[in-house]
Image (cartoon, rainbow, N blue to C red):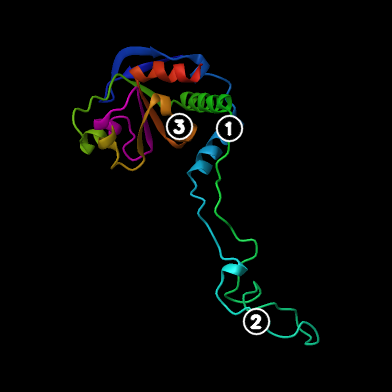
Amino acid sequence: MELEIYSKDGKSTGKKAKLNDAVFAIEPNDHAIWLDVKQHLASRRQGTHKTLEKHEISGSTKKLHRQKGTGGSRKGSIKSPLFRGGARVFGPKPRDYSFKLNKKVKDLARRSALTHKAKDGSIKVIDSVGISAPRTKDFAGFLKAFDLGTRKALVVVPAKDDNLLLSSRNIQGARVVIASELNTYDIMNANGLLIVQDAIAPLEATLTK
């Protein structure tokens, strides 16, 4: 697969980048995408939810009335879940929602997600971003050149770029990631992917091991 290479102002450079079909043109596996996105979102959950059980509620433990002979139901104490202010039955407790997913499944999910974006024409290859200083205005103009000013954009770079990261963090929906840290959720959540030309090689190397 070949894609045109654009400059940071959105104009074609007349050159083309060759993309590995084993990464950008496979038979997509939607179930693998679902599993990987599910794991990503699950690992982000804090899991700090908690409700009080009977032994944690302050209140009298005195039996309200005798066990039998009243014609009513049996009640142990005022802390019973039957009463307002009482305990909650089988309430949530702090827990870890993360789960394991095989690396091959995660790689398949990322390749499937990239294939979907490539088929939709949502991937653009750029020669470089080239922001010399942290300026939100410059990064916003860069996104606007690719019609992503008000849409979710994912910029894939070969290595950490502090100027780029600082310039993008105040723009809602924009995200800058290193090629080796790209995940399925970010790919599927973005309306458009802008991949720096130098990031193609490390991205393909990560996904074709």
Q: Nearer the viewer, residue 89 or 148?
A: 89
Q: Which mark is residue 4?
A: none
Describe the element under mark 3 as helix, strand or loop: helix
Q: Nearer the viewer, mark 2 or mark 3?
A: 2
Q: Which region of the structure is painted magenta?
A: 142-164
Q: Amino acid at mark 1?
A: Leu
Task: Return the x and y of residue 106 as percentages of the image width and height.
Answer: 54, 28
Q: Nearer the viewer, residue 7 or 164?
A: 164
Describe the element under mark 1 as helix, strand or loop: loop
Counting residues from the start of the chain, the first of labels 2 and 1 encountered is 2
Picture quadrant where residue 51 is located: bottom right
Magenta stretch holds residue 173: no
Describe the element under mark 2 as helix, strand or loop: loop
User: Are discs 1 and 3 less than 8 Å apart at CB?
Assistant: no
- Left or right, residue 174 beside residue 26: left
Rendered residue at 58%/27% (across/down) = 105
Q: Which residue is mark 3?
A: 187
Q: Which residue is mark 1?
A: 101
Picture quadrant where residue 127 is located: top left
